[in-house]
Amino acid sequence: LGIEPIASRAAGRGDVDGVRRALGQGLLLAAGLALVLGLALFAVSTGVRHAGVAPEPADDLKLYLWGRLPGLTPYLAFVVLRSAAAAENRTRSVLAAALAANLCVLATAPPLASVLGVLGVGLAESAGAVVQTLVLASLVPRPRFAGSLSLEALMPLLRVGVPVGLALVAEYAVFAGLGLVVAVIEPDALGAHQVAMTWVGTLFMLPVGFGSGVAAQIGRALGRGDAAGARRVAGLSSGLALALGTLLAAPFVLVPGNLAAWVTVDASALAGASSLMSLAAAVLIVDSVQVVLVGAVRGAGDTRFALLASLLGHYAVGLPLGIALATRGGLGVAGL
């Protein structure tokens, strides 16, 4: 994601070659990161039992992650291509690639799952990652690879991208950690928790995409020297994000049982999920606003503040408070 403001500013200046150079450097960086992250995922998949998770879900997680590993490199490449497409206002290309990936997963997941179980689901999603990357690569400018990934070329990407990556890791780790805590302290509620988080995570992708669009527009405005226009985009997008989050969260309060029934047929998960959906609605509203604001500061190239806000919000307040409410407060999964 470090190429996003760099490519957007280049596009705002009309520097097509600058966009292609940023794209090439981003793809080289993605290839290197894929190796490091692949080894990390492998280590996690084999060591999850030591975290106190029961053997059956631990084994399922291991198989699922192994199925996802082949799709890691294509997915990281897709993130780079998506940033370049947004910088040039080619977001319909991103949508076309995502639709192709979904069709691939829908076609391959059932037969693979019937034979290989959760490993087959992971392999189907890896196949979807390959498809969406190939489709998007055919629709965006060709990258320009200026030799190897030099430190001079890497530094602008790292200055912007490392804080973005750490903030994303911090946020995802909190929600993944919550699932782990539920599995340990209230395993019977894990299904209900997963149903609620599935809906939050799915609908959250809409404001995430909106935030990426905001980042691109602010970067383009700053690239052409229009600071006032960048501020207008940020202000307007904040209000729209609040409205979007409220709209997306309304069914969580109005028809929680219906939403849960789309995800599972398990009776205990259905009963527990309905009570969690109203809490999930509040999460979705606030998260919609924050992810758009993060996109705004990312478009301006100032990502350290967003990292600080994420660390303070999630680790100084959210996670310790949630654990305290779940255990000492006796609220269980609702406290989390």
Image (cartoon, rainbow, N blue to C red):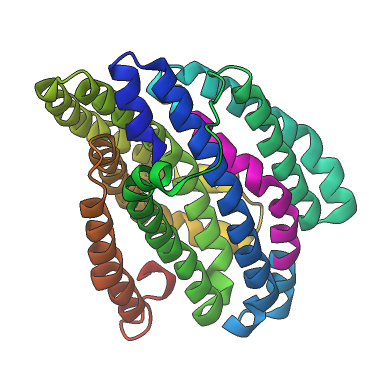
Whether 226 is drawn above or below 273: the answer is above
Residue 163, position as x, y percentages in the image:
33, 54
**Residue at image coords 20%, 25%:** 222
Quarter that holds the N terminus = top left
Whether 23 is drawn above or below 158: the answer is above
* Nearer the observer, 168 or 252: 168
**Residue at image coords 49%, 64%:** 176
Residue furthest top in the image: 14
- The magenta span reads 62-83
Quarter that holds the C terminus = bottom left
Magenta stretch holds residue 75: yes
The secondary structure that dominates the magenta segment is helix
Residue furthest right in the image: 115
Q: Is residue 28 visible?
A: yes
Residue 218, position as x, y percentages in the image:
24, 27
Whether 22 is drawn above or below 269: the answer is above
Magenta stretch holds residue 78: yes
* Nearer the observer, 292 or 11: 11
Q: Residue 239 sits in which quadrant?
A: top left
Q: Is residue 52 visible?
A: no
Residue 17, position as x, y percentages in the image:
43, 19
Residue 305, position as x, y percentages in the image:
20, 53
